[in-house]
Image (cartoon, rainbow, N blue to C red):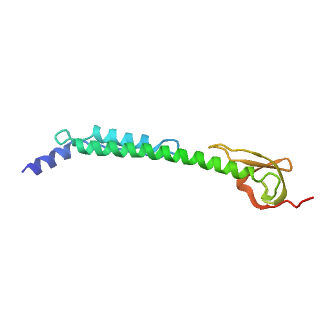
Amino acid sequence: MPDAVRYAAAATQPQATTTVTRKDQGSQKDMFLKLLVAQMKYQDPSNPASSSELMAQNATFTQVEKLEEIASQNASLLALQRSSSAGALVGRTVSYTDDEGATKTGLVTSVRLGTDSTEASAMVGGVAVAMGRITEVAQTPAS
């Protein structure tokens, strides 16, 4: 009989829905926190979440936070590694694909180092060439 009462009560209450839209600007931490708040807001008052469940969710939240920190550090290290590699191109002859799709070759005279959000670029014949466009690196012959 309690099942029938619970079913009837559930049928008369409006169903709570949560729509989650993933955007690249938002962090995983923010999304997790919103889901946790929504879960607590719409939980059944006669059967609230246990403290062990909340502790497990808090631990998961902490893990997500730490993983985001690690991902950010890895992005910084990758940018540093790319910048270091770019510096080794100075004085070498490179081939690259220009904006029209043609392959061009020239001597790297300098390198503009990148950051976490910008790519390093090599100056080849007075033209800034993004490192991703370089297709071949050759030793410059001695003159």
Residue occupying image coordinates x 75% and y 53%: 88
Residue occupying image coordinates x 28% and y 39%: 40
> Which residue, as the protein is rendered here, is positioned at the far left?
1
Image x and y of residue 86, in percent: 72, 51
Image x and y of residue 116, in percent: 62, 43
Q: Nearer the viewer, residue 8 or 127?
A: 127
Q: Is residue 132 above or below residue 46?
A: below
Residue occupying image coordinates x 74% and y 48%: 121
Q: How many marks overall?
A: 0
Image x and y of residue 52, in percent: 24, 44
Q: Nearer the viewer, residue 57 or 30?
A: 57
Image quarter of residue 39: top left
Instruction: Answer with left or right where residue 100 lies relative to residue 141.
Output: left
Q: Tell me the quarter of the image containing the C terminus.
A: bottom right
Image quarter of residue 33: top left
Instruction: Answer with left or right where residue 119 lies relative to residue 101.
Output: left
Image x and y of residue 115, in percent: 65, 42
Instruction: Answer with left or right where residue 35 lies relative to residue 105.
Output: left
Q: Nearer the viewer, residue 91 or 118?
A: 91
> Which residue, as the protein is rendered here, is positioned at the far front?
142
